[in-house]
Image (cartoon, rainbow, N blue to C red):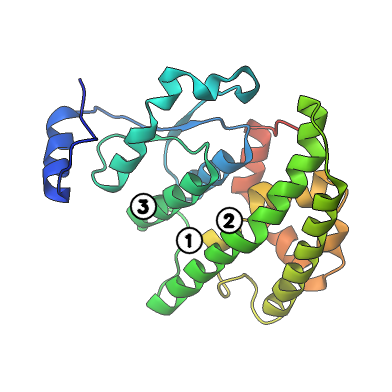
Amino acid sequence: MIINLTKKHNQDELLNLVASKFKPKNMVVKVYGPILAAPKRVLLCLIEKEVEFETVDIDIFKGENKEPEFLKLQGLVVLIFLLDVLHLFRAFIDGESRAIIRYLAEKYKDQGANLLGKTIEERGLVEQWLEVEAHNFHPPIYNLTTNIFFPQLLDGPSDPKVIEQCEQKLVKLLDIYEQRLSKTKYLAGDFFSLADLSHLPFGHYLVNQTGRGNLVRERKHVSAWWDDISNRPSWKKVLQLYKYLV
């Protein structure tokens, strides 16, 4: 069965097309590459929302993420936002993982933890801090992690200047977090949300594996916030079942 995604369809046409082609029975969410950081964001959300899932291992160092069987899933990611008939999530790419957790939190808003807030105002704050995580927190911690760990794995060069710049950016950002968390228990308010959840996969690297946990521990409110979110049963389950690559 083939669906031509290169042909232009309006949304109603595409919905009808997909519905006519896919007739799944008791399909569950599949998350690819669970040992990687970005898919852990999706796994954590699935557990919080009490949604059943399966995992499929992907070895990026053997190039399995570039094999046809994996690449053909890329076009399917779009479909989950149009029609909830094919529960196939490719969360390997970091940007996709955030889109997917938004989808999951909305789709299953009546079960599990409320990760979006109860009011429009709260939802707006969740989105605001999700954007902060994506555009201000993630880039420096990702580059820091890459320069510390990937040279060890791939025998590539590490750039001390990049590491220093990343640390400086995180220091400034975490000062802002400290100010925010002195007023609220969590980033979007007094409730755990996607905004907090999204920090866990790479925050784990920062606190536990990069030798720079002091950036969190030196800030009273950031440290308390981290202890709170990283001790959630859902995150402990993710760490227990799907250990990090490094």
Q: What amino acid is at disc 3?
A: Tyr
**Residue 243 drawn above or below residue 115:** above
Indicate the position of residue 226 as horizontal and vertical percent values: 73, 60
Characterize the local packing of mark 1: few (<14), some (14-19) or many (20 or more) Cα atoms within 10 angstroms: many
Evaluate whether residue 121 shows in this view: yes
Q: Nearer the viewer, residue 97 or 25?
A: 97
Label 1 vs 2, first from the N-terminus: 1
Spatial separation of the CA atoms under disc 2 and disc 3: 16 Å
Residue underneath mark 3: 108
Evaluate whether residue 231 shows in this view: no
Label 2 vs 3, first from the N-terminus: 3
Residue underneath mark 1: 115
Please tell me in which quadrant of the rendered image residue 186 appears.
bottom right
Residue at 33% in and 52% down: 107
Spatial separation of the CA atoms under disc 3 and disc 1: 10 Å
Q: Is residue 46 left or right of residue 234?
A: left
Please tell me in which quadrant of the rendered image residue 172 appears.
bottom right
Label 3 vs 1, first from the N-terminus: 3
Q: Are marks 1 and 2 in contact (CB under 8 Å)?
A: yes
Residue underneath mark 2: 197
Indicate the position of residue 104 as horizontal and vertical percent values: 40, 50
Residue at 80% in and 51% down: 162
Q: What amino acid is at disc 1?
A: Leu
Q: What amino acid is at disc 2?
A: Leu
Q: Quadrant of the N terminus?
A: top left
Indicate the position of residue 21 as horizontal and vertical percent values: 16, 28
